[in-house]
Image: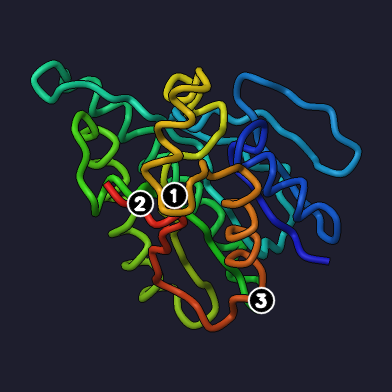
Amino acid sequence: MKNYLIVGASSGIGKQLAEQLAINNNVLGTFNKHPIDSDTIQYHFLDVLATEYDLSFLPEVLDGIAYCPGAINLKPFARIKNEDFEVDYKLQVLGAVKIIQQCLPKLKQSSQASIVLFSTIAVQTGFNFHSMVAVSKGAIEGLTKSLAAEFAPNIRVNCIAPSITNTPLAASLLNSSEKIEANAQRHPLKKIGSAEDIANLAEFLITEKSAWITGQVIHADGVWAF
Protein backbone atom coordinates (compact mmCIF):
# COMPACT_ATOMS: atom_id res chain seq x y z
CA MET A 1 0.00 0.00 0.00
CA LYS A 2 1.37 3.41 -1.04
CA ASN A 3 1.19 6.70 0.88
CA TYR A 4 -0.11 9.71 -1.04
CA LEU A 5 -0.56 13.35 0.00
CA ILE A 6 -3.27 15.29 -1.83
CA VAL A 7 -3.06 18.99 -1.01
CA GLY A 8 -6.46 20.57 -1.56
CA ALA A 9 -8.50 17.37 -1.30
CA SER A 10 -11.77 18.88 -0.09
CA SER A 11 -13.34 19.66 -3.47
CA GLY A 12 -13.05 19.38 -7.23
CA ILE A 13 -10.18 17.49 -8.82
CA GLY A 14 -8.31 17.03 -5.54
CA LYS A 15 -11.29 15.41 -3.84
CA GLN A 16 -11.95 13.13 -6.79
CA LEU A 17 -8.30 12.09 -6.98
CA ALA A 18 -8.13 11.39 -3.24
CA GLU A 19 -11.23 9.20 -3.39
CA GLN A 20 -9.92 7.21 -6.34
CA LEU A 21 -6.50 6.64 -4.79
CA ALA A 22 -8.00 5.71 -1.41
CA ILE A 23 -9.53 2.53 -2.86
CA ASN A 24 -6.15 0.78 -2.74
CA ASN A 25 -3.82 3.20 -0.94
CA ASN A 26 -3.27 5.24 2.20
CA VAL A 27 -4.35 8.80 1.32
CA LEU A 28 -3.76 11.91 3.40
CA GLY A 29 -5.77 14.90 2.21
CA THR A 30 -5.67 18.51 3.29
CA PHE A 31 -8.43 21.10 3.49
CA ASN A 32 -8.53 24.80 4.27
CA LYS A 33 -12.14 26.01 4.45
CA HIS A 34 -14.27 22.90 4.09
CA PRO A 35 -13.49 20.00 6.47
CA ILE A 36 -14.68 16.56 5.38
CA ASP A 37 -15.41 13.41 7.36
CA SER A 38 -14.20 10.31 5.58
CA ASP A 39 -13.75 6.67 6.46
CA THR A 40 -11.06 6.15 3.82
CA ILE A 41 -9.10 9.44 3.68
CA GLN A 42 -7.22 11.06 6.55
CA TYR A 43 -8.06 14.77 6.33
CA HIS A 44 -5.91 17.47 7.96
CA PHE A 45 -6.16 21.26 8.03
CA LEU A 46 -3.51 23.11 6.03
CA ASP A 47 -3.32 26.77 5.04
CA VAL A 48 -0.94 26.85 2.08
CA LEU A 49 -0.58 30.63 2.47
CA ALA A 50 0.82 30.27 5.98
CA THR A 51 4.48 31.00 6.70
CA GLU A 52 5.06 27.56 8.21
CA TYR A 53 3.32 24.22 7.73
CA ASP A 54 2.63 21.51 10.29
CA LEU A 55 3.11 18.27 8.37
CA SER A 56 3.70 16.08 11.41
CA PHE A 57 0.77 13.91 10.32
CA LEU A 58 2.73 12.54 7.36
CA PRO A 59 4.28 9.04 7.43
CA GLU A 60 8.02 8.52 7.13
CA VAL A 61 7.68 7.34 3.53
CA LEU A 62 5.69 9.32 0.98
CA ASP A 63 5.10 7.85 -2.47
CA GLY A 64 3.43 10.81 -4.12
CA ILE A 65 2.13 14.37 -3.83
CA ALA A 66 -0.53 16.14 -5.84
CA TYR A 67 -0.75 19.89 -5.28
CA CYS A 68 -4.30 20.91 -6.24
CA PRO A 69 -5.02 24.40 -4.77
CA GLY A 70 -5.62 27.01 -7.43
CA ALA A 71 -7.47 30.15 -8.43
CA ILE A 72 -8.98 31.57 -11.61
CA ASN A 73 -8.85 35.33 -11.20
CA LEU A 74 -9.69 36.93 -14.53
CA LYS A 75 -9.15 40.68 -14.84
CA PRO A 76 -7.98 43.17 -17.46
CA PHE A 77 -4.22 43.55 -17.05
CA ALA A 78 -4.49 47.31 -16.39
CA ARG A 79 -6.72 46.67 -13.37
CA ILE A 80 -4.51 44.10 -11.66
CA LYS A 81 -2.62 45.36 -8.61
CA ASN A 82 0.82 44.09 -7.68
CA GLU A 83 -0.68 42.58 -4.54
CA ASP A 84 -3.08 40.55 -6.68
CA PHE A 85 -0.20 38.95 -8.54
CA GLU A 86 1.63 38.30 -5.26
CA VAL A 87 -1.31 36.56 -3.57
CA ASP A 88 -1.99 34.43 -6.64
CA TYR A 89 1.68 33.47 -6.92
CA LYS A 90 1.87 32.55 -3.24
CA LEU A 91 -1.11 30.23 -3.57
CA GLN A 92 -0.29 28.54 -6.83
CA VAL A 93 3.52 28.50 -6.87
CA LEU A 94 5.11 29.16 -3.48
CA GLY A 95 2.60 26.88 -1.79
CA ALA A 96 3.69 24.04 -4.04
CA VAL A 97 7.37 24.88 -3.57
CA LYS A 98 7.12 24.82 0.24
CA ILE A 99 5.16 21.56 0.29
CA ILE A 100 7.65 19.83 -2.00
CA GLN A 101 10.65 21.12 -0.06
CA GLN A 102 9.28 19.94 3.27
CA CYS A 103 8.19 16.56 1.89
CA LEU A 104 11.34 15.87 -0.10
CA PRO A 105 13.06 13.75 2.58
CA LYS A 106 9.96 11.55 2.79
CA LEU A 107 9.70 11.25 -0.99
CA LYS A 108 13.33 10.16 -1.13
CA GLN A 109 12.47 7.22 1.14
CA SER A 110 10.19 5.81 -1.57
CA SER A 111 11.54 3.50 -4.24
CA GLN A 112 9.58 5.37 -6.93
CA ALA A 113 7.88 8.62 -5.89
CA SER A 114 5.86 11.03 -8.01
CA ILE A 115 4.76 14.66 -7.89
CA VAL A 116 1.77 15.94 -9.86
CA LEU A 117 1.21 19.67 -10.38
CA PHE A 118 -1.48 21.59 -12.24
CA SER A 119 -1.29 24.29 -14.89
CA THR A 120 -3.82 25.49 -17.48
CA ILE A 121 -4.00 25.59 -21.26
CA ALA A 122 -4.09 29.40 -20.91
CA VAL A 123 -0.29 29.40 -20.43
CA GLN A 124 0.53 28.16 -23.93
CA THR A 125 -2.63 29.23 -25.73
CA GLY A 126 -3.14 32.81 -24.54
CA PHE A 127 -6.55 34.17 -23.50
CA ASN A 128 -7.86 37.63 -22.69
CA PHE A 129 -7.79 38.56 -18.99
CA HIS A 130 -5.74 35.48 -18.04
CA SER A 131 -2.42 37.21 -17.33
CA MET A 132 -2.54 36.59 -13.58
CA VAL A 133 -3.23 32.88 -13.76
CA ALA A 134 -0.85 32.48 -16.73
CA VAL A 135 2.03 34.02 -14.76
CA SER A 136 1.57 31.59 -11.87
CA LYS A 137 0.87 28.50 -13.92
CA GLY A 138 3.70 29.33 -16.32
CA ALA A 139 6.00 29.19 -13.31
CA ILE A 140 4.53 25.80 -12.38
CA GLU A 141 5.34 24.44 -15.85
CA GLY A 142 8.93 25.63 -15.51
CA LEU A 143 9.14 24.16 -12.01
CA THR A 144 7.89 20.83 -13.34
CA LYS A 145 10.63 20.51 -15.91
CA SER A 146 13.37 21.73 -13.59
CA LEU A 147 12.47 19.39 -10.74
CA ALA A 148 11.98 16.44 -13.09
CA ALA A 149 15.60 16.83 -14.17
CA GLU A 150 16.91 17.43 -10.66
CA PHE A 151 14.95 14.67 -8.89
CA ALA A 152 15.48 11.89 -11.46
CA PRO A 153 15.69 8.94 -11.35
CA ASN A 154 13.80 8.24 -8.13
CA ILE A 155 11.20 11.03 -8.10
CA ARG A 156 9.12 11.83 -11.17
CA VAL A 157 7.46 15.23 -11.68
CA ASN A 158 4.65 15.92 -14.14
CA CYS A 159 2.05 18.59 -14.74
CA ILE A 160 -1.52 18.56 -16.07
CA ALA A 161 -2.82 21.55 -18.04
CA PRO A 162 -6.61 21.28 -18.27
CA SER A 163 -9.07 23.33 -20.23
CA ILE A 164 -12.11 24.64 -18.34
CA THR A 165 -13.37 21.90 -16.04
CA ASN A 166 -16.69 21.64 -14.24
CA THR A 167 -15.52 22.06 -10.65
CA PRO A 168 -16.28 24.58 -7.87
CA LEU A 169 -13.17 26.53 -8.93
CA ALA A 170 -14.77 27.33 -12.30
CA ALA A 171 -18.29 27.80 -10.96
CA SER A 172 -18.52 31.47 -11.92
CA LEU A 173 -17.64 30.60 -15.52
CA LEU A 174 -20.14 27.75 -15.74
CA ASN A 175 -23.05 29.02 -13.68
CA SER A 176 -25.70 28.68 -16.37
CA SER A 177 -26.66 26.13 -19.00
CA GLU A 178 -25.89 28.73 -21.68
CA LYS A 179 -22.32 29.20 -20.42
CA ILE A 180 -21.77 25.47 -20.19
CA GLU A 181 -23.01 24.92 -23.74
CA ALA A 182 -20.99 27.85 -25.14
CA ASN A 183 -17.79 26.53 -23.56
CA ALA A 184 -18.57 22.98 -24.68
CA GLN A 185 -18.87 24.13 -28.27
CA ARG A 186 -15.33 25.55 -28.18
CA HIS A 187 -14.00 22.00 -27.93
CA PRO A 188 -14.16 19.49 -30.78
CA LEU A 189 -15.29 16.88 -28.23
CA LYS A 190 -18.28 19.18 -27.50
CA LYS A 191 -18.15 18.78 -23.74
CA ILE A 192 -16.75 20.34 -20.59
CA GLY A 193 -14.13 18.39 -18.70
CA SER A 194 -15.14 16.83 -15.39
CA ALA A 195 -13.22 16.38 -12.16
CA GLU A 196 -13.12 12.66 -12.91
CA ASP A 197 -11.59 13.28 -16.36
CA ILE A 198 -8.65 15.13 -14.83
CA ALA A 199 -8.38 12.91 -11.74
CA ASN A 200 -8.05 9.83 -13.96
CA LEU A 201 -4.98 11.36 -15.60
CA ALA A 202 -3.59 12.53 -12.25
CA GLU A 203 -4.04 9.04 -10.79
CA PHE A 204 -2.11 7.58 -13.71
CA LEU A 205 0.74 10.08 -13.28
CA ILE A 206 1.05 9.76 -9.52
CA THR A 207 1.21 5.97 -9.54
CA GLU A 208 3.81 3.62 -10.97
CA LYS A 209 1.62 3.03 -14.02
CA SER A 210 3.41 6.06 -15.48
CA ALA A 211 6.91 4.99 -14.42
CA TRP A 212 8.41 6.00 -17.81
CA ILE A 213 6.97 9.53 -17.78
CA THR A 214 8.51 12.60 -16.17
CA GLY A 215 9.02 16.29 -16.93
CA GLN A 216 5.84 16.48 -19.02
CA VAL A 217 3.12 19.13 -19.22
CA ILE A 218 0.15 17.15 -20.46
CA HIS A 219 -2.87 18.96 -21.90
CA ALA A 220 -6.21 17.48 -20.90
CA ASP A 221 -8.31 19.95 -22.82
CA GLY A 222 -10.78 18.27 -25.18
CA VAL A 223 -8.60 19.74 -27.96
CA TRP A 224 -9.35 23.43 -27.37
CA ALA A 225 -10.24 24.88 -30.76
CA PHE A 226 -10.65 28.65 -30.31
Q: CA distance from mark 1 to mark 3?
A: 20 Å
Residue depicted at 13% across the width and 16% down the height: 79
Q: Which residue is mark 1?
A: 162
Horizontal side of 100 relative to 86 (left or right) equals: right
Q: Give the camera-side residue of 92 and 13.
A: 13
1 or 3: tag closer to the N-terminus: 1
Q: Which residue is mark 3?
A: 209
Which percent across, then down, holds residue 182? Answer: 40, 31
Q: CA distance from mark 3 to mark 2?
A: 27 Å
Horizontal side of 176 relative to 40 (left or right) equals: left
Amino acid type assigned to the residue bearing label 2 in the image = Trp
Tell me the element at label 2.
Answer: loop
Residue mark closest to the camera, 3 vs 2? 2
Which percent across, then down, holds residue 14? Answer: 62, 42
Residue 97 visible? The answer is no
Disc tally is: 3
Q: Give the camera-side residue of 174 and 203.
A: 174
Quadrant assignment for the N terminus: bottom right
Amino acid type assigned to the residue bearing label 3 in the image = Lys
Which percent across, then down, holds residue 199? Answer: 62, 52
Amino acid type assigned to the residue bearing label 1 in the image = Pro
Above or below for 91 versus 97 = above
The label on residue 224 is 2
Residue mark closest to the camera, 1 vs 3? 1
